[in-house]
Amino acid sequence: MRTEDVLAAIATGLWRWDNASGIVSLDAEAARLLGLPAEPVRLSEAAVRSRFHPVDWNEIDGVVNLAVAEGTLAEARLRIMDERGRVVRTVRSRSKPLIDGGDYQLVGTLQEVAEPQPGTAGPHTPITGDWRRSREAFLLDAGRALAEARSTAEVLRVAASLSMPGFSPDGLAVFGMSGERLTVIGHHGQRDGDEGPFTSMSLATDYPAAEVVRTGRAIYLPSPEEYRRRFPMTWPLAEPFERQSWAFVPLVVAGRTMGAWMAAFKHQVAFTPDERSVLTTVARMLAQALARAGVAESERELSLGLQRTMMPVLGPGIPGIRVAARYVPTGGGLQVGGDWYDMIRLPGGRGGSAGGGAGRIALVIGDVQGHDVRAAALMGQLRIALRAYASEGHRPDAVLSRASRFLYGVNDGHDGYDGADGSGGAGAEAAGGGPRFATCLYLEVDLETGTVDIARAGHPDPAVRMVDGTVLLRPTAGGLPLGIDPDTDYPTTRLTLDPGETLMICTDGLLETGGHDLDSGWERAKRLLEQHRGDDLEELADTLVDAVHGPGSHHTTGPLADRREDDIAVLLLSRRPATAVRETPRRTLMTIAQAEPERIAEAREQVRQLLHDWTDGDQLDAAVLMVSEMVTNVLVHTDGDALLIAEVACGEKARRLRVEVSDASDELPHKRHPGEMASSGRGLVLMEMLADAWGVEPRGEGKTIWFELTEPTGPEGCCG
């Protein structure tokens, strides 16, 4: 005969619990003993746990952990409960842990025992171990769960789920105070609305909770007769609930009674000294958890209020554009930080008008160093200063220069700040003192022409999503973060936002949060921008934030798992097309200054991004090589800057790439003869070999070198 058959003949079942997977395997007899159909079954740990009395589970959990730690046999008695919570039988469990590395399996038997008789072990009769050990296990579990609760609602849910050893209540209520009146903070085990008569009850009322709040002393009522005798005026309010025993325990924090906790029972409880000790301990932990939750909720409300006052409302009213923005604080404490965004209507002039219709706006996004109240305060000051400078009509470079001097002056006033160690310097910075800097991106947008002038102070570059979904990171010239050097210059970069295109600016929190650095975080954001369909900017803003903080964000963490989280600000702006836009060419424009030869690499990357779906890889490499040669020749052989314009347009049958590099020199290039200065002069030779067409054109003061490549078989739908 099989071992299982022999054990079944003596009413003994076999079970195996895999700790790694959380799966419990039962043979037919073990399943029968647990009140399930008598057939082999695999269940989750939670499903099996629901069959045991919760008091016994508290203890068996500790017994199993001890057996695993010591490699000994785990043995205990357990009550089996039916769906109605009634004890149907008692079983003895014997199990042996099989340890494999950090995981283990428990293999054991279940056998029904005759004592106590089914039905005689009520919910107030502990079976496993002695009552004090069950109580200690319960209090440890309750303390851990209440300590982890972060809101009043979570605290109340934890309190409702607590299964006290031997005398679990079926009804709970938490009372607070509002002036001289009693309030109901939350309740469990009653229907919604049942709390009505007890809400806003005067503290002078002859009601147990009111007396507990007045006196700070617990009241235990072991029977309805005792309740009716002591509180005849309010007994009619409690009688309909058909409870048999009540405990009203004060909630005390720092020596002050902040409310009362009611535990009501459908069975009679004697409230022995041990039982009162458990109730008092739970009430103390509950009071502390509610106090912590109240402080946290007040801080969160203060944080949200502070951020709401500091963030602009991007409502409708500006024709020709759509705007969406998000701010997500992820710092600790008050959850305030230094990130901000702003949109400013600019005065008329310089191609705009002060009234309705087309005009100019400024977009600002920035990040003050730190995640504390001082960072938020500096952010507010800096935002006001930037608004003032912008409203005066200054150009973007002048706005940032003035803002940098302003923040430098504010920092200068904190030079004498002594930190917690009294030394200033590093200690002061750790304590919140010392100078703070800020990164910032300031954009002036002409709503009529789509021209965008950008000044950057150590901030991430903007990105543009074109009509066909192509996304380009637009490199911009920049200076130091604000507040470091009062005399820093901020060069201006110009780009054009065509109708239907979307501009994205953000703080580094959107890119670096979730274990990413700037490069991998940008790739994540770029994919989301490319995959977005339609023109709903609000939906796109939510998508970008959800990728960082949404439910699935922990599945897509970057390579830097220990990177600290950061605040997030993101702002999107799109120009509304006057008509349907289908064949707008892709275009990028950038200037490479004589003093910035390192930006040649950015020019190559711009072309690669522009040709992200170009089907001929050899042509793409050729285009990048020719761009590098053309821009390098300008920087080497002239005294001026190079202006790069690259455009992908659809023809009748194929797409065409045209690249132009312009400079201010009138000297025309010429091809070198073989052997003459082999290290230079190869640019025109390369274009003659690689380009489908090329040329050199004098243009007033200066010249333009251009080449074209034609893609013979572009992707389906590429031209519209």
Image (spheres, helix red, strand yellow):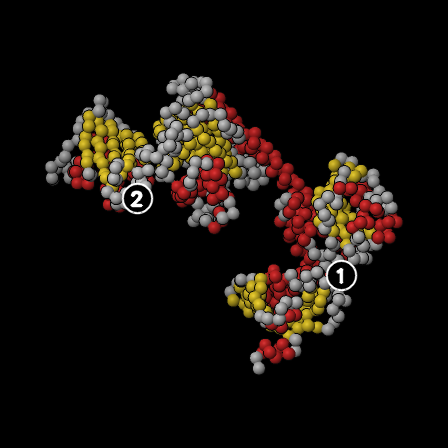
Say which amino acid is labelled 1: His
Residue shown at 22% from the left, 24% from the top = 699
Residue 347, percent across and down? 45, 19
Q: Quadrant of residue 277?
A: bottom right
* Residue 307 vertical position relative to residue 265 in the rendered view, above or below: above
Residue 136 location (% of width, % of height) = 70, 58
Question: Which is nearer the eye, 346 or 64?
Answer: 346
Badge 2 crowding class, 10 Å Cα cut-off, few under 14, some 14 to 19, many 20 or more, is few
Would you say residue 709 is visible in this rendering?
yes
Residue furthest to the right = 229
Q: Is there CB contact under 8 Å for labels 1 and 2?
A: no
Mark 2: amino acid: Pro
Residue at figure coordinates x 58%, y 32% from the top left:
306
In the image, residue 465 lies at what x, y percent?
A: 38, 36
Identify the image quadrant of the C terminus: top left
**Mark nearer the N terminus (1 vs 2):** 1
Residue at the disc numbered 1? 124
* Residue picked out by circle 2: 715
Residue at the (64%, 49%) spot, across then down: 147
- Distance from disc 1 to disc 2, alpha carbons, whole Å, reads 74 Å
Q: Is residue 287 above or below residue 348?
A: below
Which of the two residues, 275 or 84, is positioned nearer the viewer here?
Answer: 84
* Disc 1 packing (10 Å; few <14; some 14–19; many ≥20): some
Left or right? Give the position of 147 relative to 632. Answer: right
Residue 409 visible? The answer is no
Which element carries disc 2, helix, strand or loop?
A: loop
Q: What is the secondary structure assignment of the residue under circle 1?
A: loop
- At which x and y percent is residue 40? 58, 70
> In the rendered image, which quarter is residue 203 located in?
top right
Image check: 394 left or right of 208?
left
